[in-house]
Image (spheres, rainbow, N blue to C red):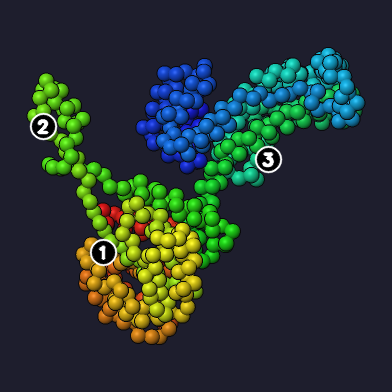
Amino acid sequence: MQSNLVDFIQVLRSHDIRVSPAETLDAVGVTTTLGYSDRNLLRDGLAMTLAKTPAEEVIFLDCFDRFFQQDLADFSSAEMSDPQDENNDTDATDDTAAQTEDLSTNQLSALELAAQNNPSLESLLQTPLMENLLNNNRNELTLAIKAAAQQVDLQQIQMFTQKGQFTRRILDAMGEEQIRNAVIELEKSESPGLAVLQRYRDILRQQVRDYVEREYLLHAEGKTQQFMDDILSKTRLNNIEHIYLHKVHELIRKMAKKLASRHSHKRRRLKRGQLNMAKTLRKGIPNDGVMFNTFWRQVKKEKPQILAVCDVSGSVAAYSKFLLLFLYSLQDILPKVRSFAFSSHLGEVSAYFDDYPVEKAIELVNWKYGGATDYGNSLMDFSKLALDDINSNTTVIILGDARNNNGDPKLDILKSIFQRARQVIWLNPESRRAWGSGDSEMLRYQSACHFSAECNNLKQLERIVDQLLKSTR
């Protein structure tokens, strides 16, 4: 059961529920304390241990019900009877049990008769698998399927194309090959027991296929999403098709949530501020309650300022869109984000993000400031709007390809920004090999930046924003 619990926790992780090693040990302790006899009690105990939010609790309950499913497979041969016979017997519901028992008896008699002259069939009928099939022993057969699935590592299934492969592996692990060989021999001898044995074989195959399908939906669903997220995070942003944009937006929010959890401000112990009464009393217990030591709590208020300057011309607009979406998904950590957009001229667009949802604001920004690129004129506009606001606590992020259409780059303005700011970061979606080629001014601009990097996918963007957050703490 502990092995099953570890597999279940792995399923939770694939469905974006964060479970640490310490929480895994807590879950083992819960199962040891509560036991496995009361399903509902165990479910509630694990939910309190592993689900941290209402959303995670919903996912947990769904995964729990699917992972610890109690339904038993039905290997009754009556289910495989001909559809025409079933239609003719719809009015005889009172005699169903008796008919099923007679059918099973007749089938068993036909197989025993065929086995008299067939040693391999006689040997097959004595195997536990065939005995359980003939007796419709659902408990033993369901346990056999689960044991075979564990033997072939079914929980590793990731693609729908693997379902047939794992179905065959499970059948082989259960000993279905002996049934196949017996069917071949009965076909050659045209035995009357052939149809009966084929029916039991088909029942077994169908139940195994159904089990693999359920496990695929449980295990592969989260892994497929993780695989898709990994592909999207490494794809150039301007190559992502429109139908995947909603997935990209969700991935950005997921990345931002992870970074927010990692870089959120922590309380620091200081010698002044609000008295931490609980801790002070607790530390005074060894001294008979005398508070020799006092403990204080106070949040250090840090107000970093980030100025995001984004090229929204046609060649770079897609990258700027995702940078702005990423930054505004981190507003709780970086409350002072001012945004500027430019092509031939530059303007501050922070108000758009205050008045509209992020996606709508980005659409309006692209519509207003899109066009041909003029970095020199845009730097002059930026100098008029924000140069006096830049100080040693300011980070300036510039996203653009630095292609200036052979105009004046106004490098002196960028150098003045460099001298005032805490750091100037330039993110260029072009490959480094293209920097300085043609009308690119990137090599000259790079001399006035604290940090410059190629950035054209979400994985690179996440890494850079992570470093940014570390530097602004």
Query: What distance separates the C-alpha of mark 1 from that of mark 2?
Result: 39 Å
Q: Nearer the viewer, residue 329 or 205?
A: 329
- Precedes in sequence: disc 3 or disc 1: 3
CB under 8 Å between callouts 2 and 3?
no
- Give the residue number, with chain letter if any, for mark 3: 164
Q: Position of residue 38 (x, y in %)?
A: 52, 18
Give the residue displayed 42% in from the left and 80% down from the top. Answer: 344
Give the residue displayed 26% in from the left and 73% down from the top. Answer: 387
* Residue 456 seen anywhere in this rendered image of the structure: no
Residue type (three-letter) at the residue carrying disc 3: Gly
- Precedes in sequence: disc 1 or disc 2: 2
- Indicate left or right for 232 with 273 as reference: right
Query: What distance separates the C-alpha of mark 2 from that of mark 3?
Result: 68 Å
Q: Which mark is residue 293?
A: 2
- Give the residue number, with chain letter if any, for mark 1: 394
Placement of 207 over or under 375, stated as above or below = above
Q: Position of residue 114 (x, y in %)?
A: 86, 20
* Residue 349 seen anywhere in this rendered image of the structure: yes
- Precedes in sequence: disc 2 or disc 3: 3
Mark 3 closeness class: few <14, some 14–19, many ≥20 residues within 10 Å: few
Give the residue displayed 10% in from the left and 22% down from the top. Answer: 287
Identify the image quadrant of residue 306: bottom left
Q: Position of residue 70 (x, y in %)?
A: 61, 24
